[in-house]
Amino acid sequence: TYDSRLLAKAKETGKKLLTFGLSDAANVQVIDSNWSQEKQVHTIKLKVMDAVVAVSLKHFNESLPLNVAAAVAFSKAIGLDDRQIVQALERFEPAKGRFNIISKTNFVIVDDSYNANPESMRNGLLSCAKMFPDKKKVLILGDMLELGNDSAKFHLAIGALCAKEIDPDLIITVGKESLAIAEGAIKAGLPKDRILNFESVDPVCRLPSRIFEKRELVFVKGSNAIGLHKIV
């Protein structure tokens, strides 16, 4: 990305540089990102060298614009033209467990269960809120592992985000670390009766289907070791 510290180090190599990011100085710059609720299309506009390129995706995620910019920069580096790049990107489909949207008869599952860290958890939750603003939501959130001494702080912050930005019908936490998600949500004003806590994934798999069917969207995310893919 166009980061001054990284750029300084990169220049020391003496190699030709191609940068991407949000800065005006980047070779590939994200200049706009817009999700159309009506068309269900995510349009990302980029300045690519001296041209403006628009990419239309069927999927939305807060992290996509910078990822698209990185892909464009790499593609330019290996000699692809803008038309080839846009055509390839517009065929993009997320991998299993990576904000994969599964439509069921009565509700939608957003399977983001492959992994989680504070930034990707925040992106996933906000993306869900933006894509499905009017749906009643169940959030199944597992531990974000390997965060060291800051683990409680990060989990509390995610809980507060859930309460303030998502206002879910129900939060289901899975694992010991994610108890702090519940704590953060309650401190931020979410009623206790809208939260369930479980130590492992198996009891969640045995919950009656009516818990999910009377809502409209189920978002699933946590570190891979928690095994939330079993719920999906």
Image (cartoon, rainbow, N blue to C red):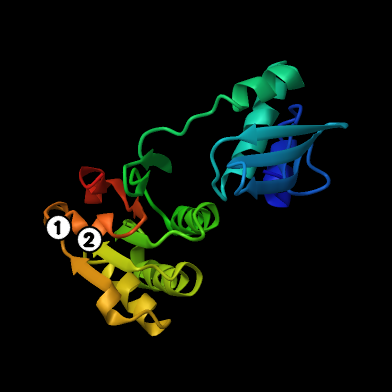
Under mark 2, the amino acid is: Ile
> Decide: marks 2, 1 in contact (CB < 8 A)?
yes
Q: Secondary structure at mark 2?
A: helix
Q: What is the x, y in percent for residue 174?
A: 23, 61
**For residue 73, side relative to residue 121 (left or right):** right
Q: Which mark is residue 207?
A: 1
In this view of the protein, can residue 98 be seen by the observer?
Answer: no
Q: Which is nearer the eye, 144 or 32? A: 32
Q: Quadrant of the C terminus?
A: top left
180 up-or-down from 77: above or below: below
Task: Examine the image and state in which quarter residue 181 appears.
Answer: bottom left
- Mark 2 sits on what residue? 211
Can the viewer see residue 166 in this picture? yes
Quick one: quadrant of the N terminus? Answer: top right
Could you tell me which residue is drawn at 73 percent across and 37 percent down?
19
Horizontal and vertical percent position of residue 32? 74, 47
- 231 or 47, which is in the foreground? 231
Number of other residues with Cα within 10 Å of mark 2, as a class: few under 14, some 14 to 19, many 20 or more: few
Q: Is residue 26 left or right of residue 120?
A: right
Total numbered labels? 2
Residue type at tag 1: Leu
Q: Is residue 54 left or right of residue 87?
A: right
63 vs 207, left or right, is: right
Residue at x 28%, y 59% (from the top left corner): 214
Residue drawn at point x = 43 percent, y = 81 percent: 188
User: Secondary structure under badge 1?
Assistant: loop
Query: Alpha-carbon neighbours of circle 1 within 10 Å: few (<14), some, or many (≥20)?
Result: few
Task: Name the spot of residue 44 as percent of width and height, x first.
Answer: 69, 40
